[in-house]
Image (cartoon, rainbow, N blue to C red):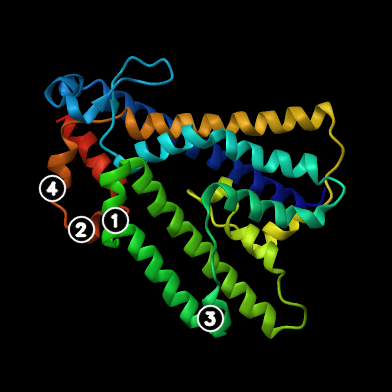
Amino acid sequence: MTPRAATQSDKVNCISYLRAWHWIIWTAATMYAMWRFTTHSLTRSMPELDPLSFSRGMFGIRRHRDSTDREWDATMEAYKASYVMLFLQPILAQLLFRRNKQLVPYFHAAYSTLFLLWNYVFLAAFSGSEIICFILLVGVILQIQLDILPPHFRELYRRYGVTVEVMTESGLGWVGTRSLSFAIDFIRESSAEGDPPDYWKTLGYVLYFPSLMSGPLINYIDFEKQMLERRPKWTWRRLVRHAVELLTCLAYHVTYTLITHWFYSPLIPSAWAGYTYVPTCGGESHITTEGYEKSFQ
């Protein structure tokens, strides 16, 4: 090994060593703060002081769960009610159209429309202006985040409850953002050489049920590639790999739920009250840290 190669190898080892120590210290500090946060004496009495804001635990945990996040509870209820349909869509697409991938877009559009009875017109795409699409995209995101909704959404809440209202609001928001994302891709593809995207592929892209209510946003090009690519044969190794991926997603979900709904403190509202609306956007970590510090003074 040349001296230059040895120096480069030492730098890589040093960076890996520092990175490992960074994650060890960060993880240990986070776990310690969360432990102190949840074992605070005032925290234990919160479910008794405000019983309407807490519900029974999940996943076999006896500790009460913070149920003040209305949107989270509605989303969970919606997925519990429709998880069979969500799992069936990609499975049926693979089983029924394994030899004829060209029918998959028709299946996705028909399957989702069957359950949702929606159709969508891509008016922004025909404008030919990316600026208009981006402006509309910002408007949709602001409407979702700021809860600026038409009056008929309130009627949904009155008639059908919080779950239907929240999921309709969320689903329409994601459909709007996906449609505008497609419109931008459509405009860029139209300006270049090549045929425009097929209508049924785009309709299947917008109405793909598993990602309809929660995202994440999928680029149209990536969706089309995954939808039409020829899959390898099913083997035990592939089954195990997919099972591990599903269990990993479930573990992430359980961990996220535990962190966001089982760690609470009476000190958080007092810390939050000192901030205006804009600074609190994305400032949860700072407020949580301040709550930690006040707990131990």
Circle 4: element type: loop
Among the two numbered marks 3 and 4 on one chain, the one whose residue lies closer to the N terminus = 3
Q: Is residue 142 left or right of residue 8?
A: left
Work out whether residue 164 can be spotted: yes
Q: Is residue 207 above or below residue 19?
A: below
For the residues carrying marks 3 and 4, which lies nearer the camera in this image?
Answer: 3
Q: Position of residue 36 (x, y in %)?
A: 27, 24
Disc 3: CA contacts within 10 A as few (<14), some (14-19) or many (>=20): some
Q: Position of residue 78 (x, y in %)?
A: 44, 38
Q: Residue at the spot x=48%, y=82% of the render?
A: 131
Identify the residue position indicated by label 4 in the image. Answer: 273
Q: Amino acid at mark 4?
A: Ala
Circle 1: element type: loop
Q: CA distance from mark 2 to mark 1?
A: 7 Å
Q: Position of residue 201 (x, y in %)?
A: 69, 62
Among the two numbered marks 2 and 3 on one chain, the one whose residue lies closer to the N terminus = 3
Disc 2: CA contacts within 10 A as few (<14), some (14-19) or many (>=20): few
Q: Amino acid at mark 1?
A: Cys
Q: Is residue 204 left or right of residue 253?
A: right
Identify the residue position indicated by label 3 in the image. Answer: 130
Q: Residue at the spot x=57%, y=73% of the render?
A: 183
Foreground residue among 66 and 41: 66
Disc 1: CA contacts within 10 A as few (<14), some (14-19) or many (>=20): few
Q: Which mark is residue 277?
A: 2
Q: Is residue 206 above or below residue 16?
A: below
Q: CA distance from mark 3 to mark 4?
A: 40 Å
Identify the residue position indicated by label 1 in the image. Answer: 281
For the residues carrying marks 3 and 1, which lies nearer the camera in this image?
Answer: 3
Q: Quadrant of residue 137?
A: bottom left
Q: CA distance from mark 3 to mark 1?
A: 27 Å
Foreground residue among 267 and 141: 141
Q: Is residue 115 left or right of residue 220?
A: left
